[in-house]
Image (cartoon, rainbow, N blue to C red):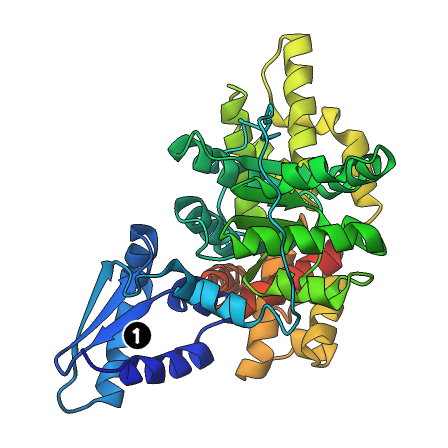
Amino acid sequence: MVSTKLWNECLKTLERELSGQDFNVWIRPLQALEDTQTLRLLAPNRFVMDYVKQNYAEQINALLMRLRPSGTPQLTLQVGNSRVSVNSSPATAVSKSSLLNHAVTSQAIPVAQETFTTHLNAKLLFSHFVSGNSNRIALSAAKQVAQEQGIYNPLFIYGGVGLGKTHLIHAVGNQILQKQPQSRVLYVPSERFVSEMVKALHEKKMNEFKRHYRSVDTLLIDDVQFFMNKAQSQEELFHTFNYLFDNQKQIIFTSDRPPQNLQGIEERLKSRFSCGLAVAVEQPDLETRVAILHSKAQIAQTRLPEEVAYFMAQHIQSNVRELEGALHRIIATARFTNSPITLTSAQETLKDLINQTQSHLITLAAIQKIVADYFRVPVSTMRSRQRSRQIARPRQIAMSLAKELTQHSLPEIGDAFGGRDHSTVLYSYRTVAKLKTADSQVQRDYSHLLERLTH
């Protein structure tokens, strides 16, 4: 085998062509073995191998032909590891090099016999998590970590309230325990970590506190924004992180914002949050909200008519938690009254919630203005006949948002966008739906606009 020069050239191009999250989740973990006839890519697990084969093999082959037009090597994909030492795997190598220009000594704390509680919610499983464009990267990364601890360390999942971050880290912990029942997996909200540390300081039991947190195999810390402006708690988290990381233990954090936006958190901690993989969970789109409602209804062994699911998904857009709360209310009302769930009964049950939503009624004009401002084009272009890409794409996104967020019919939406036919509105909606899957930038733009319009 010779050097991986050809694969390194491919990596430079792929990093430019793919979104940062797609590159870091799927391409960076691959290891390459080359000779004059073959480029063999080794994936850390079958999940990554199958995804790369399905989504990126054609693109990589095209790159090989472009970079090596004569004597293009044959591309093969398999599960494996070209390195003997875990310390030199791509994810940990990058992380350790960024871990950072500070000299840190982690003192071992002897493990004592104790009753260990995971604090995991056994009901929060991957099988109960509804996947959509808004969370597919985070879900994929979480599944990979559950399958192979250390591949992304730490994994940092961020997003707004009630979007599924806590569900994901519980699902990781539950799957690890299913495969490795003796593994020490600990879930802890940041607030509990802080309160337990304060109690340990007061009772002079810091050794016991350190031993508890440093004896785990996987540490799941929820809502790390709670550490902001708590210097002593950050100090202890910093040393706990270093101890676990140096001993190749998996760490997962969640937050309501990305690491770089955590004001009041020390830079040395933010750099550790960022040294693995940070992935976002966005607001779910209409179809995902409908799928979530059907999934929750199925778990509750309740039949939810399609028109009721769409009614709820259209009117409750802020987060999954509120959507689930509304569903529980509808189910409870149906059981108390011993009557089936219908659109009429749902409207009556949720009328106070819907009235609150109506107070923030989203108009077609508001959608046009916010989309135009976001893409820095005149509002008049939303209604113009111009078809340049610079104008057409924002207009398509605006029409898609109008269909998702308002009760207007397709002809009414078309009329507001310069007298366009209803089929044009439907085409725009379907086009944007495909783009959200294929293009992460479109997905981010759509999610930002959705959040801006619904808050």
Q: Identify the residue shown where x is 67% and y is 61%.
A: 258
Which residue was labeled with disc 1? 59
Q: Is residue 315 above or below residue 385?
A: above
Q: Say if residue 361 shows up in the picture.
A: no
Percent across and percent down for residue 301 are: 51, 19
| Quadrant of the image occupied by residue 48 | bottom left
Percent across and percent down for residue 154 are: 56, 56
Image quarter where the N terminus lies is: bottom left
Q: Say if residue 125 shows up in the picture.
A: yes
Q: Residue furthest bottom?
A: 70
Q: How busy is the neighbourhood of tag 1: few (under 14 within 10 Å), some, or many (20 plus)?
A: few
Q: Identify the residue shown where x is 50% and y is 32%.
A: 295
- Badge 1 marks a residue whose secondary structure is helix
Percent across and percent down for residue 10 are: 33, 81
Q: Which residue occupies the foreground of this view, 409 or 330?
A: 330
Q: Is residue 151 above or below residue 312?
A: below
Percent across and percent down for residue 340 are: 58, 15
Q: Is residue 268 above or below residue 62?
A: above
Q: Amino acid at mark 1?
A: Gln
